[in-house]
Amino acid sequence: QVQLVESGGGLVQAGGSLRLSCAASGRTFTMGWFRQAPGKEREFVAAVSWSGDNTYYRDSVKGRFTISRENAKNTVDLQMNSLKAEDTAVYYCAANPKNNVYGTEYKYWGQGTQVTVSS
């Protein structure tokens, strides 16, 4: 069983930055971030492999967001720069027991953290 706890959300102006962090208990492989805006379905944002060497992003965040992990601390971060109003959502950390950044078999989820970008 893996437990995930996110932190770092908040309110920021458009063009600003936020850093989300996810603390995991238990063994994890691929780690990902997802988000869900009001009235919309949850969508994939970014993923990182166990080694941290492989990453994968949705097109709309490429060049603005960076996912990273520190296995010694069992944490995964999402650095978000040049934030836009359309980035406003609840952001969720998730763990995929398979080591595949392109996979969709996320089994464990955090409770989410709100990110609000004001325009």
Image (cartoon, rainbow, N blue to C red):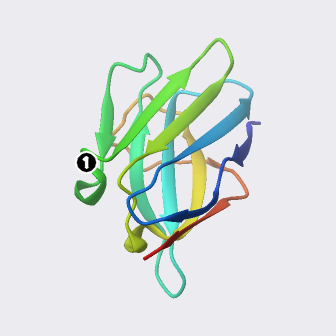
Q: Quadrant of residue 51?
A: top left
> x%, y% of residue 83?
40, 59
> x%, y% of residue 81?
39, 48
58 with respect to 96 (left or right): left
Q: Is residue 110 above or below residue 37?
A: above
Amino acid under label 1?
A: Lys
* Quadrant of the frame with the C terminus: bottom left
Instruction: Specify few, some or many for label 1: CA neighbours under 10 Å numbering under 14, 14-19, or 20 or more.
Output: few
> x%, y% of residue 118?
49, 74
* Quadrant of the frame with the N terminus: top right
**Label 1 residue SS:** loop
> x%, y% of residue 10?
65, 60
Please name the residue that numbered disc 1 is placed on: 62
Question: Can you name the residue that lies furthest to the bottom here?
Answer: 39
- Residue at image position (37%, 44%) is 103
- Residue at image position (69%, 18%) is 73
Q: Is residue 54 above or below residue 93?
A: above
49 with respect to 7 (left or right): left
Q: Is residue 25 above or below residue 8?
A: above
- Most foreground residue, 106 or 33: 33
- Residue at image position (43%, 36%) is 67
- Residue at image position (64%, 55%) is 9
